[in-house]
């Protein structure tokens, strides 16, 4: 997960997710099979049955226990378990609610997505296309840009590692300006996009990954 590097440090800082010391057990979202029958006296749950698949934020370890409140049952007949860790899980829901409830895209508008090749960004771009928008994705390699355009339907892509002038690159991609900016990265990329933002634009602020390891507030 993109936020993992900033979580794994001895210095704990305030954050929207957990931060860890190097000796802590790392926690992330898992899909697991309930094995209630192994512990019939401990696991007396009305919510789950043996061999049902559940998801929860659990530590990276072989064995652990959990309460009912820490787990959610999923329907693997509806979709594979892996989908609940992606498109039907945290990243997919982040993309949907961030774009649709905050970005409020309208047909014909221009949506720019930074971190576009990530798990959230890819979904944001596809939802924006479904809404009839023009979509520009910003990513860090030519391979990612090709993927965004050829596999996921983005209209344009900008490789921030080979672009010498991000402001000009965004302007050239869509001269009419940006109506929705789904920001996953912050920093210089976001500064360039904001120079091309339209009046009444919406900016879902999802992540600031370029700043996560900063030791002071950038000016």
Image: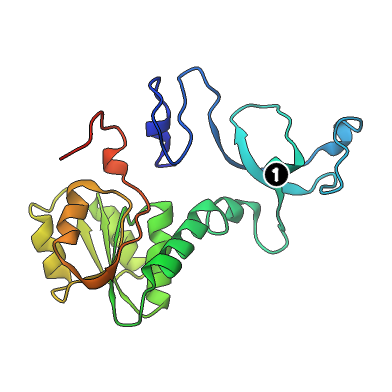
Q: Nearer the viewer, residue 142 or 26?
A: 26
**Quadrant in which the N terminus is drawn:** top left
Name the residue located 43 percent from the left edge and 35 percent from the top edge: 4
**Quadrant in which the C terminus is drawn:** top left
The correct choice, above or below, for 65 with respect to 211 in the image is above
Percent of width and height locating residue 130: 42, 76
Q: Nearer the viewer, residue 77 or 186?
A: 186
Quick one: SS at disc 1? Answer: loop
Percent of width and height locating residue 138: 25, 57
Mark 1 residue crowding within 10 angstroms, few (<14) / some (14–19) / many (20+): many
Name the residue located 31 percent from the left edge and 62 percent from the top edge: 203
Residue at which label 1 appears = 71
Residue 128 is left or right of residue 145, and the answer is right
Residue 97 is left or right of residue 29, and the answer is left
Image quarter of residue 181: bottom left
Residue 167 is left or right of residue 22, and the answer is left
Q: Nearer the viewer, residue 140 or 120?
A: 120
User: How many numbered marks are there?
Assistant: 1
């Amino acid at each position: 997960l993109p936020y993992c590097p900033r979580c794994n440090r001895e210095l704990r800082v305030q954050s929207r997710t957990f931060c860890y010391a190097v000796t802590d057990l790392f926690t992330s979202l898992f899909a697991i099979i309930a094995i209630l029958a192994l512990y019939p006296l401990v696991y007396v749950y009305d919510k789950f049955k043996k061999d049902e698949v559940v998801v929860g934020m659990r530590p990276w370890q072989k064995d652990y226990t959990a309460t009912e409140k820490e787990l959610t049952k999923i329907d693997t007949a509806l979709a594979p378990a892996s989908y609940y860790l992606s498109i039907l899980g945290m990243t997919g829901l982040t993309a949907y609610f961030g774009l649709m409830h905050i970005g409020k895209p309208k047909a014909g508008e221009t949506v720019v997505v930074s971190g576009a090749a990530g798990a959230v960004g890819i979904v944001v771009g596809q939802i924006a296309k479904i809404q009839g928008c023009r979509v520009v994705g910003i990513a860090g390699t030519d391979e990612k840009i090709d993927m965004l355009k050829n596999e996921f339907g983005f209209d344009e892509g900008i490789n921030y590692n080979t672009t010498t002038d991000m402001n000009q690159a965004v302007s050239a991609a869509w001269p009419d300006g940006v109506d929705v900016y789904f920001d996953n990265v912050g920093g210089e990329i976001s500064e360039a996009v904001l120079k091309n933002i339209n009046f009444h634009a919406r900016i879902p602020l999802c992540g600031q990954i370029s700043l996560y390891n900063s030791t002071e507030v950038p000016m």
